[in-house]
Image (cartoon, helix red, strand yellow):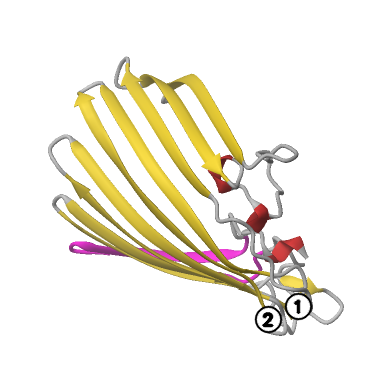
Amino acid sequence: MEVFQQPVNYRSDNTVKYAGKFGSFSGEGYWSFGNGVAGAGEVPGQFMRDIGYGASLVYANGSFSATVAYDEYRPTITPATGATGKFRKAAGAVNYAFDRATIMAGYRWGRNQFPDGTVALHDNLWWIGGIYAISPVLKLSLGYYYQDLRTMKVTPAAPTVHPANPWEVLFIADYSLSKRTDVYLTTAYAKNAGLDLHSASLGFSNVYVLGQGKTNMFGAAVGIRHKF
């Protein structure tokens, strides 16, 4: 039943999408006839099985921008009956640019449900961060993320689990050698989760898994990037 904790709809198959711009506003919407991630995709006679849909709206005017978004998909959990779960997420964020700095903050609400309507995962995610240009070629980024795990269940009849809430701080320094090439240093520290908040809410299904008996993780990387 780990599928109820995992946000496995990173991409959707069989999708139609609309995008439009109206002055300071721009919006997008999509519909997937068969997401094809956890279930069988399109099934004749079962229109709502494995569907996915969502929409977003962005307002941008000068230095300020704001966005809201909603996403939902219904993966097949019981293939024999076609019973589907319901995964919903809604988010909002703002961004403001100064002369050299940009600050941003946002919030994401999430709720995953079993076919009988029981809540499998209910969480809230907040983030805040900023980018500062020390010079035209050197930029520093700092971000903080906090996930509030409200409800977690492995099965509808299982007791509610209350793991420690994960949080993470990251720092990035980026230096441009040219218009197309830059070098960077990125570091992150996560508490009660692996890096990128890969935690119990994902069933520890990713590569960043905490070591036995550990509650935190630190990572750092140096690289060079060339844009083609």
Observer able to see residue 29: no
Q: Amino acid at mark 2?
A: Thr
Tell me, for residue 98, which label it has, or none. Answer: none
Residue 37: image quadrant is bottom right
Report whether 161 appears left or right of 144: right
Report whether 128 appears left or right of 196: left
Q: Which residues are magenta?
A: 13-35
Report whether 64 appears left or right of 79: left
Predominant secondary structure, magenta span = strand
User: Residue 8 location in percent, x, y?
Assistant: 65, 58
Report the quarter where the N terminus lies.
bottom right
* Helix, strand or loop at mark 2: loop
Report the quarter where the C terminus lies.
top left
Placement of 109 over or under 100, stated as above or below: below
Residue density around tag 2, few if under 14, some if 14–19, many if 20 or more, within 10 Å:
some
User: Residue 25 location in percent, x, y?
Assistant: 24, 64
Placement of 116 over or under 150, stated as above or below: below
Looking at the image, do the residues carrying marks 2 and 1 touch, with CB atoms under 8 Å apart? Answer: yes
What residue did someone put label 2 on? Answer: 118
> CA separation, marks 2 and 1?
6 Å
- At a point 41% along the width and 22% down the height, the residue shown is 184
What residue did someone put label 1 on? Answer: 156
Q: Amino acid at mark 1?
A: Pro
User: Residue 78 location in percent, x, y?
Assistant: 81, 75
* Most foreground residue, 157 or 24: 157
Placement of 61 over or under 51, stated as above or below: above
The reply to whether the magenta stretch includes residue 209 is no
Observer able to see residue 193: yes
* Helix, strand or loop at mark 1: loop
User: Residue 165 location in percent, x, y?
Assistant: 55, 56
Residue density around tag 1, few if under 14, some if 14–19, many if 20 or more, within 10 Å:
some
- At a point 15% along the width and 50% down the height, the residue shown is 63
